[in-house]
Amino acid sequence: MTRGTGRGKSAPAPRSVDVARLAGVSQKTVSRVFNDEQYVSADVRRRVLEAAEQLGYRRNNAARALASGRTRSIGVVTLGTALYGPASLLMGVERAVRDTGYALRVVNTMEGDPAGIAGAVDSLLDQGVDGIVISEPIDEEEGTDSDVSLRVDVPVLVLGAPSAVAAPTLLTAGDGADLMARTATEHLLELGHVTVHHLAGPQRWFAARDRLNGWRATLTARGRDVPQVTEGDWSAASGYRAGRELARDPAVTAVFAANDDMAIGLIRALTEAGRRVPEDVSVVGFDDVPVAAYVTPPLTTVRQPFDTVAQEGLKRLVHAVENPDADPVPSSDPPVDLVVRASTAPPPPPPPNRTTPARGRRAPSGSRGDTSPPPLPDGGPPSHH
Amino acid sequence: MTRGTGRGKSAPAPRSVDVARLAGVSQKTVSRVFNDEQYVSADVRRRVLEAAEQLGYRRNNAARALASGRTRSIGVVTLGTALYGPASLLMGVERAVRDTGYALRVVNTMEGDPAGIAGAVDSLLDQGVDGIVISEPIDEEEGTDSDVSLRVDVPVLVLGAPSAVAAPTLLTAGDGADLMARTATEHLLELGHVTVHHLAGPQRWFAARDRLNGWRATLTARGRDVPQVTEGDWSAASGYRAGRELARDPAVTAVFAANDDMAIGLIRALTEAGRRVPEDVSVVGFDDVPVAAYVTPPLTTVRQPFDTVAQEGLKRLVHAVENPDADPVPSSDPPVDLVVRASTAPPPPPPPNRTTPARGRRAPSGSRGDTSPPPLPDGGPPSHH
DNA sequence: ATGAAAGCGCTAACAA
DNA sequence: TTGTTAGCGCTTTCAT
């Protein structure tokens, strides 16, 4: 069997009138059938569908959009990176959009793009969309005309952050990074670490700032020192560079990295510098990338609920699109999912002349130099906690 | 300054007639200006643009599509995973599409999706596209009606593989995996390994089969043993499982993994089993994921030229869309980019009673049990070769 | 339960 | 160089 029209390249595509003629009904009736409207007898419906099938009829979307004023599509603005977070979110958005019956248009904003998010939104509006999703916005460059509020005619859903967009409806989803960062930080404190260092993401990203804020709020709330922040660019390379610095400071016993890639680079640098993970330094990542359970040591991290966020957000966006007057549905925070693996442990015993109370269990504490490779308490499949 | 129309929520959007009236010209002239047609005096053009600006005029794309028969958009079928390869390719496609001035529509095919690629293409055709990109196709499930040829009215570009699609123009790009796999395999042979094992990707993927074929062809051409293939699912987890098996076979001294994630899992399993990488076993990955240079040991891998492939492919696709009669532009293979890092080395000395000629340099050969962590000859930034 | 007529906002083909 | 006239293939509104 062959899908598709099967027409030769040159024959014009059949229109609804053609179907109507063949089925012996009016063109409007064909329209009724294809729109699942009521008041079509079962018999007529069947005849119409048969005629359509026979002709290989396909509704013309441009005509539909023109006549109805609705494009039945949602536009998404993404960052154009294959980074695990943004890419996962985009895939989640695609699924969620398709589930709602809308089509998806995609425009990237590369970092440093002169037109920025405003330009991408503009382009989406030109293309024609009924609603817009802005995924993981970042601050724009100074000096472009996009560092100001952007006014749009359609509902907008911002994923992962607030934003300076003015729209008839402005929705937010997935802005729970703050809470997740708190959980990560608290995990380390509960293991007995005196404080937690933070390897932050680029601060132009709202997501990076959220995580930093959550971390800082936790330390402050517990009355702990807030160490200086190191800023990376999400890459393992930047994590590695940061790790070389942090390895020199013996006070560093726990680091919360703003994503897994940086955590992996960080761990590598620490290991090279002779600081064992987790015996000497504990590391928590963020994202739960697929390799996280298989690097050495398996990474303790916070899993991001991309699909849930996208689904929930899109349901609300579509609701706003279809009910312009109804109140926006309030968002609900997804649960935080800390995945404890082997990169975190209680801090090493304090130097003999200091008296820092160390809570929690002691590390297995093999003496230095006898471990090759590190103990790997959790070598198997990801242990989900 | 504020971008966007600035109209209230209820005022109807201005049409080209409104602009025409305000500028004191005919509606057709407005159309001429916005389509950059010739034969418009500079003065008229200016007046039209001013009027448009003042009104916040935006062309209605549905009307354009309806009148012209062209949607000015390209549809892409992707796999819906955040795997580095497919995600990078999608980002490359987005950039490339935007560079051509077309809009992008995206539909995912999840593995196991009943409708499969045919369903995704169908949905794109319903939405209305002038051309279609199929990215990284995989074999469909048996029993669906999509395991047969699919007929389409618009040009189709298949990225990374041949495919069973019937279209007026069928283009291919990025099908050089075979050659890249050869290069990876040859690298290992040249280091002196007697043969190379292969940790393959899921064989339903064309990309996985290509890599396997390239590997096998190289071994065959050189008259080497072709060891049994282990098949993974692209995940580090599957690489880890495969590694546990391979670690038991002392004949394994070199493994070519079909992607980096599996290579990372593989290395972890080997290390846990006491088989050092690269001293005892060399491993080559595929993709050059961002963390590849920062795992332990830094991974030798083949970088995939996603952007180049997407750009080149799209240029040809758009050419086919706009010149239906012209011959399709032939494709050109991008150069292979082997990135040599620290996961590959000459094989260990053969057991005393065997006589296998070992070419190439000897490994640094530290005696067993003294390495914690492994030497890390290439600890710094990625060494590009 | 079905049909007829009138646009939706553009581009295309042809004047002028 | 500019304007006029017809549609593009649907959905909408109003009849029947």
Image: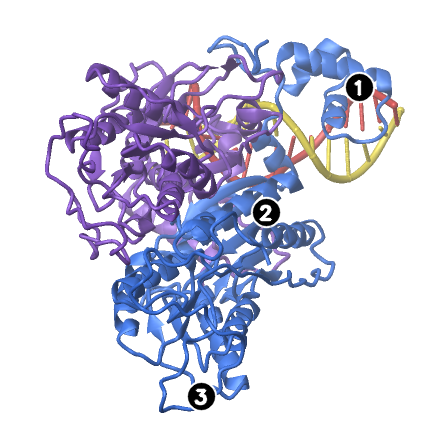
Chain colours: A purple, B blue, C yellow, D red
Q: Residue at x 38, y 38 (%)?
A: A85
Say what secondary structure mark 2 lies in. Answer: loop
Q: Residue at x 48, y 25 (%)?
A: A69
Dividing the picture into quarters, in which one does residue A231 lie?
top left
Front tag of 3 and 2: 3
Looking at the rendered structure, the kind of residue marked 1 is Arg
User: Looking at this view, is B176 or A121 the one in front?
Assistant: B176
The residue labelled by disc 1 is: B45
Dividing the picture into quarters, in which one does residue A147 lie?
top right
Say what secondary structure mark 3 lies in. Answer: loop
Q: Position of residue B260 (x, y in %)?
A: 42, 58
Q: Which mark is residue B130?
A: 2
The residue labelled by disc 3 is: B356
User: Looking at this view, is A173 or B297 the one in front?
Assistant: B297
Q: Position of residue A352 (x, y in %)?
A: 18, 32
Could you tell me which chain the residue with mark 2 belongs to?
Answer: B
